[in-house]
Image (spheres, rainbow, N blue to C red):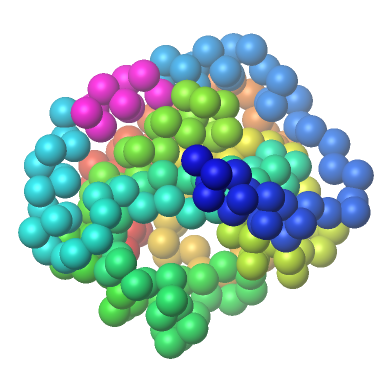
Amino acid sequence: MLENVSSLFSFSKNCSSNINLSVHISAHSKIKRIIDIIGALVGLFITILIFIPVAIAIKKNSQGPILYSQIRCGLQGKPFRIWKFRSMYNDADQKKHLVENQAKGHIFKNNADPRITEVGHFLRKTSLDEFPQFWNVLTGEMSLVGTRPPTPDEVQWYNERHWLRLRVKPGITGEWQVNGRSLVDDFEEVVSLDLDYQRKWSIWYDISLIIATIKVVLHRKGAH
């Protein structure tokens, strides 16, 4: 617990900005929050059902923990700890500098990342690795629909336009996930999609993105 608090404190500077960042109206929506809670409870129920087979597969495939956590920057840059099923080898973070970044701008992406395990490829292709994030939604750190939560080392290079994407809560899904998922490899395009989401936001638009995400995941479109 103390280690978690220390990590959050040490990363808080990286996630902070001198820009006076106003909060988007969606962050205060009680209906959106109710939908998040209901969706999170359903998602966590599914997570419980798949936990044992996923855990066995992960442990058999490689050494290391079943769950992976990482500090991300959330609403207004507030740092939080995100949770996923581990899809990479245990020393992946230490070897990140050895992998070529195929994306443009302040995101990291490699379509043939050697740090991803065999089971990890399946988890990512089916989006099963994302299911523990429903806990982050339940606690209010994330939403079902929002922006992709960036890492502190990405945020430290943000300009004023980039910071605008953090006016909403980070989401398990969002505009960029539905419109290409891993096929979107230009950070400026990610920012444009996130800002489009803010302009178009409504409860019904959130629901449409959730439905679209389910379709995309079932067809395993655009994931690596």
Q: Position of residue 95 (x, y in %)?
A: 41, 80
Residues rendered magenta in the picture = 40-48
Give the percent coordinates (x, y) of residue 92: 37, 72
Q: Position of residue 111 (x, y in %)?
A: 35, 74
Residue 195 visible in the current orientation: no
Q: Is residue 62 above or below residue 130?
A: below
Q: In the image, is residue 201 above or below residue 93?
A: above
- The quadrant where residue 98 appears: bottom left
Between residue 201 and residue 11, name the one nearer to us. Answer: 11
* Residue 106 in view, yes or no: yes
The x and y percentages for residue 201 are 65, 30
Q: Residue at x 26, y 54 (%)?
A: 65
Query: Is 104 drawn above or below residue 82 in the view shown?
Result: below
Residue 13, quarter of the rendered image: bottom right
The answer to whether residue 136 is left or right of residue 74 is left
> Is 7 positioned to the left or the right of 179 in the image?
right
Q: Residue at x 11, y 53 (%)?
A: 57
User: Residue shown at 27%/69% (left/top)?
Assistant: 89
In the figure, residue 15 lies in which quadrant? bottom right
Main SS type for the magenta part?
A: helix
Residue 114 within the magenta-colored segment of the rendering: no
